[in-house]
Amino acid sequence: MSYDDIRTYIGLLKQHAQTEHGINIHWPAINLASLRAVAHSQLASLQVADAVATSTHYAVKLSRFGLADPSYLALLRRHAYRHKGCFLGYGIKFLTRYDALTEKMPHLSAAFENW
């Protein structure tokens, strides 16, 4: 994702938050001017984010053999943030609606079984 894509996405979230789409973000914490690239070796929190992203990738992306491995993601489920018991949009955020994704990727629901 490019910086422009991130800025556009955050702007879209801000627009939707103003029209009561259930988006609850503490906007003073968002400073787009400070958006920058940092090598993950410089920040431990980026290493954690990288591990979570990689676990999610392998849990939902089918291999050339048509298999996905949700085991790593299953280990992370108890650590995912939830708002009122809901992890979608909070602990896990997809840029496409989850139900639309599961139509195209039926195996996706298995990755989030028992969440």
Image (cartoon, rainbow, N blue to C red):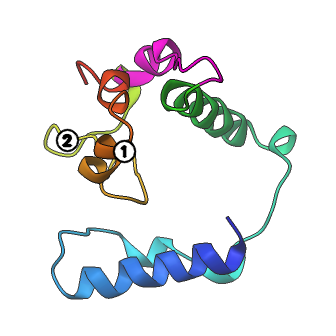
Asked if marks 1 and 2 touch (Cβ < 8 Å), the reply is no
Residue of label 1: 104
**For the residue labelled by badge 1, is the local secondary structure a helix, a strand or a loop?**
helix
- Of 108 and 76, the residue lying toward us: 108
At x 86% / y 49%, what residue is drawn?
39
**Which span of residues is magenta-colored?**
63-77
Relative vertical location of residue 37 with respect to residue 83 in this rendering, above or below: below
Residue of label 2: 86
Q: Position of residue 53 (x, y in %)?
A: 59, 37
How many numbered marks does the figure carry? Answer: 2
- Of 83 and 92, the residue lying toward us: 92
Q: Does the magenta portion include 76?
A: yes
At x 38% / y 77%, what residue is drawn?
13
Amino acid on which the number 2 mark rests in the picture: Cys
Using residue 34 as the reference point, say whether residue 107 is left or right of it: left
Amino acid on which the number 1 mark rests in the picture: Lys
**For the residue labelled by badge 2, is the local secondary structure a helix, a strand or a loop?**
loop
- Mark 1 vs mark 2, CA separation in Å: 22 Å
- Of 25 and 114, the residue lying toward us: 114
Q: Quadrant of residue 28?
A: bottom left
Q: Position of residue 77 (x, y in %)?
A: 37, 23
Q: Position of residue 15 (x, y in %)?
A: 33, 87
Task: Give the farthest residue toward the front.
Answer: 65
